[in-house]
Amino acid sequence: MTPDVATPFPLLSLLLWLPLGGTLLCLLLRHSSNLCRWISLLTTLTVLVVALGMAVSSIGGSGWLFYEDAAWIEPFGIRYTLGMDGISLLLVLLTALLQVAAILISWRQKQRPALFYALVLVMETGIIGVFLSLDLILFYLFWELMLIPMFFLIGVWGHENRVYAAVKFFFFTLAGSLFLLLAIIWLYLLHGGQTGDYSFALDALRQTVLTPGQEMILYIGFMLAFIVKVPLFPFHTWLPDAHTEAPPAGSVDLAGLLLKTGVYGMIRFAFPLFPAAAQKSLPFLAILALVGIFYAAWIAYVQTDMKRVIAYSSVAHLGFVILGLAAWNQLAWEGSLLLMINHGITTGGLFVMIAMIQDRSGTRELGKLGGLWTVFPNLSAFFLLFCLSSLGLPGLANFAGEILVLLGAFKADPLWGGMAVAGVVFSAAYMLRVVQSALWGESKKLARNDDLAVREWLILVPLAALVVLLGVYPAPVLEFLREPVSLLLETGGMP
Amino acid sequence: MTLSDLHALLPQLILALGATGILMVGAWWPSRAPWVLTGVALSFCAAISAGIVLPTVTEVGGMFGVTPYARFFTILWSILTGLTLLLSLRYAKVHRFAGAEYTALVLFAGAGMSLLSAASSLVGLFLGLETFTLVLYILIAFNRGEAIGAEAGLKYLVMGAVATGFLAFGIALIYASSGSFHLPEAMHGLQIDGQMRPLGLLGWAMLLVAIGFKVSLVPFHLWTPDVYQGAPAPVTGLLATGAKGAMFAALIPLFAALGTLTLELNAVLAALAMLSMVGGTLAALPQRNLKRMLAYSSVVHMGYLLLGLMSGGPDGQRAVIFYLIVYGIATLGAFGVITSFAQADGEPQDYETFRGLGYRHPRRCSALSAFLLSLAGIPPLAGFFGKFGIFHAALKSNHHLLALVGILAALVSVSYYLRPIIVLFMQERPAQRLRPGCTHEFAVLTVCFSLVLYLGLYPGPLLELISQILPSP
């Protein structure tokens, strides 16, 4: 069935290709770093405005809010199919928002600015493409498109150990995704052999008749790619290195957005395509998620680098998200997706702030920091807010998602819920340690002692406002999630 | 030979007679750039004539086909010859190559390749193959003064001579078993219950050894790194793309004609493909020299191509041809970048000389990175759809294990393809500036780069074209 929403203007394509246009402009005008800076800021802002406009215009809508379909590579039956439902809409909004923050935080990029902004913009196209694609090869292309820019962002602009981290990141994700490619091709051949219609369209491939053995192998092929990206314990080892070594914009993109593509891949592709195998795997997912929550919290507690603490906290939070998915009910899924968005904003905010702190103090080491509150009251207040949100303080963003996940998990299995609650306590431990050693205590030597500048206010205020807003009133977000989530749970998504 | 036969062979005649003419006139009028440019013009004339002149016969002399398939490859190799010559313009000047001789030899190589791709009998195959192999013996050692070049030439000569021996003996055995050189009649000796079957199979096995040498499949690949390293970069580009590609182009109809007659050989083929993918990958990993790395990586690519060839059917054939093209473009581009950096005292090959060069020469280094990533099969570059096609064909014909080995090799290959990119862009050291490029070099690189990008984003038209020219089984 072709969805009845036919927009005369290809808004989805506009959203998708705008950043790439910005990239080309940046590369053409690479000799003027000031111009590049403004081009990239304007590009990301335009994407944000377009995405917001699309969100406003589709309040109360149902089905595919936007949909585009065109022939692309006909000999293989590959099509250019984009679709946006509530879930992808929210994730695209998150992407657009965090990219503006990423550009603003790298405003003073000194080293090869044009190339830097160009790569950040390519990332944006890749991420938005992943959230919109409904053709498996198109999805795979965007999935891989996120790889190269991030590799360069880490490898060229990263910190001390950058090349090692970049290569590790590239390998882990590519290892997962190559199996995904093999699985996609096999599924395509099975479907084509059964129906004679060789197509990579998601809704067509969902009709493939599979034996349980085939379904399980294919499901594992898909999940390997997504689990590595999320990352679920024990596939998380690339993440701390990548997050720590990446430049600020890269960390924001990695934690805020890239991890979400893994979860999105699961709910949009892996679960609907292989529902029976997915059901069988849920207990394993829940166990891995729970182990991840505790393990990551434990490791986070002993880290001395702030970025590493936040990196491990991401593993723990994504553990909650996966636990919610494993609970497999409306409440938990809504919670998972909400947590995902809130985690993106909170962690994005934290990485932005760590960059600001490093700017001023010259270090991210907890042992060398201290007493920031007395020198930078405004900055410290924001930092405290994000930290509190991250540890799940009621009334702030992360709590709203976590509580829904916990409720859903209790519904599915009280044991899961009970253990996860204990995990929340753990996360309080390591976050409070960060707050304690960075904000309170003796003041240490600082490189600069000016508080927030206008540009920094501009980044922080919207993020902080969202943290509070989504914490006290997440209803509008949940409204967008309700219908797509129930469809995904019941029938594997819209046709 | 009738007039219509000559008419049908027009492109090859343009190349071969043009080369002869350049050689003869060049002896009286020594010059460099004009001759190289004449060669470029002749190559493109040949490509155009292959494209627009419709032959009235389907076969010439019972040896060479003039089917759309053969004409497609004639166009391809003519363009390749032209681009190689264009690329060599400055290189030939810096290294004081004799212009007329060099141009003539490259044109002969082009004619040989196009004859090999068009071969419809085993004699044609032999003739085509030897034409360009003989030429390459000379071209590889064209830097007479350098020991490394001479060594490469000698290695290729010895290995090539052994391979030729196998080839001739294999063809003789096949002829003895079937009484015909012509395809597909030469397969008759292989009838399942035929008396001559053992002889025929032995002949095919020998043929396979010769082919293994020519396209450098493991365990016949040992000459590859030294020859790649020692040969002048444009010649290496020609060797890596055209010489190997023409062989595969000839193999496609050969395998299609073989059909199921050689099931015994399938295990051998599978072993060759697997050994090439694994062995090439392992050998490429520790390389610190760009040309040697590309040599070993080409072994891996030949393994993929063999996998596609074994998969057979229209899908497999289409995948092999598409892969050949995208592999050829990226390889030519990579050697083109090396060529453009070349100076009188040698070519930059060691990674050490590339350190931090990415910001000194951003355009060429970005292009080199794109070519390497395309070879690694990273989307959105052309190499991705090449690999995609091969795996698609392999899974379709139930070569699951080989496809899995191929995927793992592709994963590991990223490691050796990323290393030069890391050296170029992620290692800070004020590298000395290398040569600024010339316009004609940039033109070739731009063509390759655009094609790598275009075929990665929109491979549909080329795939359709290939489907139309496939030889009928």
Image (spheres, rainbow, N blue to C red):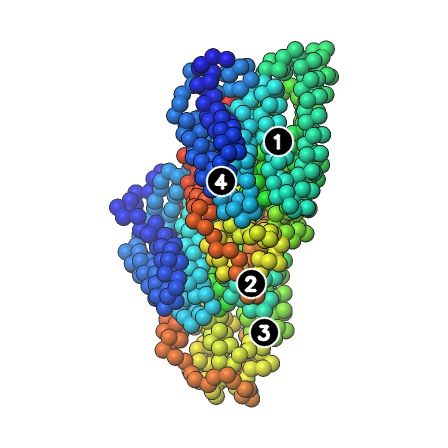
Badge 2 is on which residue?
A: B431
Q: Residues within 10 Å of mark 1 (few under 14, many from 20)?
A: many
Q: Quadrant of the N terminus of chain A?
A: top left
Q: Residues within 10 Å of mark 3 (few under 14, many from 20)?
A: some
Q: Position of residue B101 (x, y in %)?
A: 55, 35
Badge 4 is on which residue?
A: B31
Q: Secondary structure at mark 3?
A: loop
Residue depicted at 52% across the width and 31% down the height: B23
Question: Residues under labels 3 and 1: Cα distance?
Answer: 61 Å
Q: Judge depth for marks 4 and 2 and give the one in front.
A: 4
Q: Quadrant of the C terminus of chain A?
A: top left
Specify the subunit that label 1 lies on.
Answer: B
Q: Judge depth for marks 3 and 2 and give the one in front.
A: 2
Badge 3 is on which residue?
A: A305
Residue depicted at 47% across the width and 76% down the height: A356
Specify the subunit that label 2 lies on.
Answer: B
Badge 1 is on which residue?
A: B133
Residue depicted at 41% across the width and 80% down the height: A452
